[in-house]
Image (tube, rainbow, N blue to C red):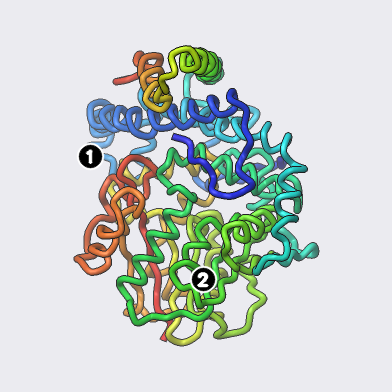
Amino acid sequence: MTVELKHQMKPHATPDEVARGRFVSGIRSLILNDLAADMRSAYDRRAVPAFRKANGRDPETSREAHEALRGDPAFNIYSAMRVQAQKMVWASVADSVEREADRLAAEAARVAAEPGGVELDPALDVPRNVHAIDVHLMPGSYTRGADSLEAGAVYDRGLAVFSMGLMGANLDDIGLSMSQYIRQRFPDFEPRRILDTGCTIGHNTLPWKQAYPDAEVVAIDAAPGPLAYGSARAKMQGQAVHFRQMCADDLAFEDGSFDVVWSSMFLHELSKKQRAKALAEAYRVLRPGGLMLHMELPPNAQMGAFDGFYLDWDSYYNNEPYYKGFRDEVPSELCTRAGFAEGDYFDFVVPSIGIYGEQAVAEAAHGDRAEAVGQQTTGRLAEGVMWFGFGAWKR
Amino acid sequence: MTDAPLRPDDAPPSLYDDQGNPRFFNDPGMDRFVAVVMALAQEVWVQEERLLALEEAKSGAAVDREAKVKQFIDRVFAPVRGA
């Protein structure tokens, strides 16, 4: 199903556009559930035995699972259809964004005086990984339309189709699930200042303002257009968030000035060098007692070969060049290299609050956390999705 | 968007065609053919929704489009299941 956006910039789509979006959500569901299961079956029936015959053992890594499956009919059809469906996501919303550019600008202007705001930095050298590649096959990437509302609108509307309803009614399931988990697990923690890094349109920023309404929430990204859109979107939803154009690996904030540094699905978009710097910056701007928290894809070290390959697929075929490199790293080591003490690291899996409900999140926060990372539903945008997170306290 | 596309360090060039697009089938035409079939199915569904709208107007009974599109996709793409 395609999600209907919950703010005034939602598309006034034609019936044909609605039908196209519905089809794309439906075909993605077929690919990510049914064809994915077919590919797993083919892996067990054909790819593993063939690999075993050639190598005397089963595939042991994501890379070897990939090698084993390349050329298999189930891999071919899954992959070719998934690439095309991804292109269809963005194509299904492009016309309405172009047609409604003036209306979007008028809607944004109408809420300009509401609390919150956006501060762009025209002098910022936008990194190559943000502008020089069509990230997840989105034409023009995050910088299409420069600082206009275009990129944000394409992303927001595209995500509504892409998510198949699995990212929540406001596309904020990750932020809601994670912030509620933290509130439940650490009830005495009362952050006063929260920073979201790599926020795009702030869809997973707003839940932190909802979870901690007295906190000041700041959200940064390198791309200007999504920030302008995200600021208007936040104001339309009555959330006072301060958006600023900035790179996560070069924060223009003072040492010890935040209680939470958060990101969602962001670290895998950075090169290894950028990622290390971003984590070091997070450590620097946290106050003692502050929390760094990232929602991300689970690491390869905690998954089997096939499940690791399944997530790494995006790195090769969905214009996510740093995806696998990130998943090959060990989150705890990333944190200790950034300055956090080894004993202050933790990781966890949160059930999607939209699918499993608030009680399930509460039970996860209070229950046994030494499981679930390796489960098939962890990190996969498919039926029954659960979110992986890791973080560390600064002492 | 760039002359030197960003790719994973360990990605063999054979994963892509000479224009940088992922390739999966031995015959590169098949990758394009899959895209054509999917686009065609999408446009048939658009026409199906137009018909559903007419039928709803005539009967006064609402149709569950989410259930209908799932049935449609399952029917059209049944031949690729179990590959």
Q: Which residue is mark 2?
A: A279
The answer to whether mark 2 and mark 1 are in CB contact below 8 A is: no
Foreground: A367 or A173? A173
Q: Position of residue A202 (x, y in %)?
A: 57, 58
**Which kind of residue does numbered mark 1 sit on?**
Arg
Q: Secondary structure at mark 1?
A: loop
User: Which-is-in-front pick, marks 2 and 1?
Assistant: 2
> Camera-side residue: B20 or A126?
A126
Q: Using residue A36 as the reference point, say whether residue A110 is left or right of it.
A: right
What residue appears at the point 41 percent right and 20 percent down from the top-left corner?
Answer: B61
Residue A245 horizontal side relative to residue A393, left or right: right
Q: Position of residue A395 (x, y in %)?
A: 41, 86
Along the line of sight, which residue is nearer the eye, B50 or A47? B50
| Pointer 2 and pointer 1 on the same chain | yes
Please tell me which residue is depicted at 53% across the width and 34% down the height of the picture.
Answer: A86
Pinpoint residue B33: horizontal percent, then vertical percent.
53, 15
In this picture, is A105 found above or below A192? above
Total residue callouts: 2
Chain where mark 2 sits = A
Query: Does residue A260 appear in the picture of this structure?
Result: yes
Q: In the rendered image, is residue A244 in sight?
A: no
For image coordinates 46% across by 79% down, the residue present is A191
Question: Of helix, strand and loop, which one carries label 2?
Answer: helix
> Quadrant of residue B1 in the image?
top right
What residue is at 54 percent from the left and 18 percent from the top?
Answer: B46
The chain letter under disc 1 is A
Q: Which residue is mark 1?
A: A57
Decide if residue A307 is on the left or right side of residue B40: left
Residue type at mark 2: give it.
Answer: Leu
Q: Residue A300 in the image: x percent, y percent? A: 35, 53
